[in-house]
Amino acid sequence: MGSVSVVLVRPLVAAVGSAGLEAFWGATDLTPQMVMDDDVRISAPQFCVAWSEAMRLTGDRTLALRIATATPPGAFGIVEYVCRSSPTLGEALRQWVRFLNLIDDAVTVGLVVEEDRACLRVERESEAPAPASHELCWALVARYARELSTVPFRVTAVELAHRAPDNIAPFREFFDAPVVFDTEITQLVMP
């Protein structure tokens, strides 16, 4: 069993917007005070419910992509700072894998480097999976890698173990790469 920092809930609150927050608070057992307190952690099931509610209230199956586009630099605190301070993308990814548990220890992600590719891979899934949170995670990594890399960066593939939405075109457009759902593992493949 693991827990998740409320830092990862804040983008959901912003995406839901003021019109839907009363329903969001009621469905998730979270409060504005909890979400504003940097030291609060919630259970994996609460995080799963928060994602489900945010998607239900917004009616947006591409919510993770929208959040990834709108998230301001620094939103993920010290973990993001350590990654942004790394001299290379490879080192940033290693730091992210190393310190991810500071904001989410319900999931374990590893970096697997093979001959000509590197894979960020979900090695241990949460007891209460929030599939769209993986979409957000991979979208943020892809976005920041594009923005921060000194050479052109392009994801090779996105593989997600959960069910595909009705329309996967927005995912392919965002990642500019093949996006496959219902895979055995969840991973972001990079050169």
Image (cartoon, grey):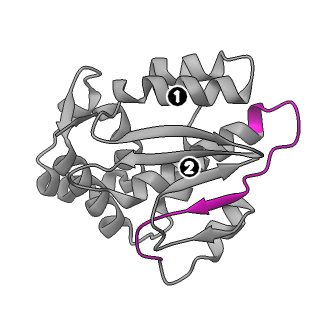
Residue plotted at (60% across, 31% down) = 93
Visible in this render: residue 184? Answer: yes
Most extreme residue toward the front is: 115
From the top left corner, tell me how far across and down residue 190 is, in percent: 71, 48
Vertical placement of residue 130 versus 148, above or below: below
Most extreme residue toward the right is: 151
Q: Which residue is mark 1?
A: 96
Question: Is residue 152 highlighted in magenta?
Answer: yes
Residue plotted at (65% across, 52% down) = 189
Mark positioned earlier in the residue sequence (2 or 1): 1
Mark 2 vs mark 1, CA separation in Å? 12 Å
Kindly identify which numbered label has been placed on residue 139.
none
Tell which of 145 and 178 is nearer to you: 178
**Which span is picked out in magenta?**
147-164
Residue plotted at (52% across, 28% down) = 96
Q: Quadrant of residue 178?
A: bottom right
Q: Are marks 2 and 1 in contact (CB under 8 Å)?
A: no
Residue 160 vs residue 14: left or right?
A: right
Number of other residues with Cα within 10 Å of mark 1, as a class: few under 14, some 14 to 19, many 20 or more:
many
Residue plotted at (38% across, 60% down) = 131
Tell me which amino acid carries mark 2. Trp
Vertical placement of residue 58 versus 2, above or below: below
Visible in this render: residue 74? Answer: no
Tell which of 88 and 24 is nearer to you: 88
From the top left corner, tell me how far across and down residue 119 is, in percent: 61, 46
Examine the residues drawn in magenta and state their main secondary structure: loop
Kindly identify which numbered label has been placed on residue 138.
2
Q: Quadrant of residue 66?
A: bottom right
Tell which of 18 and 89 is nearer to you: 89
